[in-house]
Image: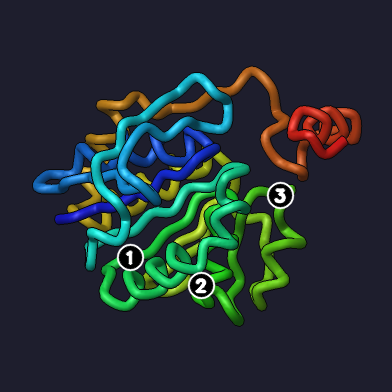
Amino acid sequence: MDIVIPLFKHFEPLDAIGPYELLANVPDARVRFVAPEPGRIVDVLGALRVDVPTRFSEVDSCDVLLVPGGAGARQMLDNTEFVDWVRRMHETTRFTASVCTGALILGKAGLLKGLTVTTHWLAMDDLETFGATYTAERVVRNGKVFTSAGVSAGIDLALGLCALLSDELTARAIQLYTEYDPHPPYDSGSLATATPEVVARARELAGRG
């Protein structure tokens, strides 16, 4: 079972590493990272450096394609070769998924037109320019297309994929092994629960204040 996660300059680290942690524990699964060019890819926060040996164009097919987001995802929208590759890969995948603003890349590839999907709340308006309808759900499935909300939501998406790629018992065991049992100290994880002050501060931290 071949699972491919493309990385690019300024990717959001948890978008990729969170799902990788879970999916790599699926029996008989192989998770591979690919990149625009072989070499070291630096995340959006600047301290995580991942050595990726494989160019995305070297991969012709996979069972699961999972596209992360981050500031770099917006830059990749202008990479026609990459967007075309995502479109071609989708033709033969079992599942195609995005985390956070990775949904914009799926949208650019024409995979979300007419669908109700999700992404990071800061990108909801951008998402709809690709003919999709935004919903604040954490994970949304449309056939073989999965989208998840921002950053940490990719873990929920990946856990659901674990069940589909193996079985529910295995997915539950992976959840236990990773001790994924969140009990956050604050109830500000979505626009539905965050105060206006929290939203404003989040925009400032994202560089959109």
Using the image as rendered, state which of residue 167 and residue 13 is in the foreground.
Answer: 13
Q: Are marks 3 and 2 in contact (CB under 8 Å)?
A: no
Comparing marks 3 and 2, which lies closer to the viewer?
2
Q: Position of residue 69 (x, y in %)?
A: 54, 47
Q: Cα distance, mark 1 to mark 3?
A: 23 Å
Comparing marks 2 and 1, which lies closer to the viewer?
2
Q: Residue at x 65, y 48 (%)?
A: 120
The answer to which quarter of the image holds residue 56 is: bottom left
**Quarter containing the N terminus:** bottom left
The answer to which quarter of the image holds residue 130 is: bottom right
Report the disc number at residue 95. Answer: 1
Q: Residue at x 31, y 31 (%)?
A: 51
**129 on left or right of 142:** right
Rendered image coloring scheme: rainbow
Q: The disc labelled 1 sits on which kind of residue?
A: Phe
Q: Position of residue 203 (x, y in %)?
A: 81, 36
**24 on left or right of 48:** left
Which residue is label 3 attached to?
121
Using the image as rendered, state which of residue 12 and residue 192 is in the foreground.
Answer: 12
Using the image as rendered, state which of residue 22 and residue 35 is in the foreground.
Answer: 35
Q: Position of residue 128 (x, y in %)?
A: 71, 69
Circle 1: element type: strand
Q: Looking at the image, is 91 positioned above or below residue 205? A: below
Which residue is label 2 attached to?
109
Instruction: Please tell me which of labels 1 and 3 falls first in the chain.
Output: 1
**41 on left or right of 132:** left
Crowding near pointer 1: few (<14 within 10 Å), some, many (20+)? Answer: many
Instruction: Please tell me which of labels 2 and 1 falls first in the chain.
Output: 1
Q: Cα distance, mark 2 to mark 1?
A: 15 Å
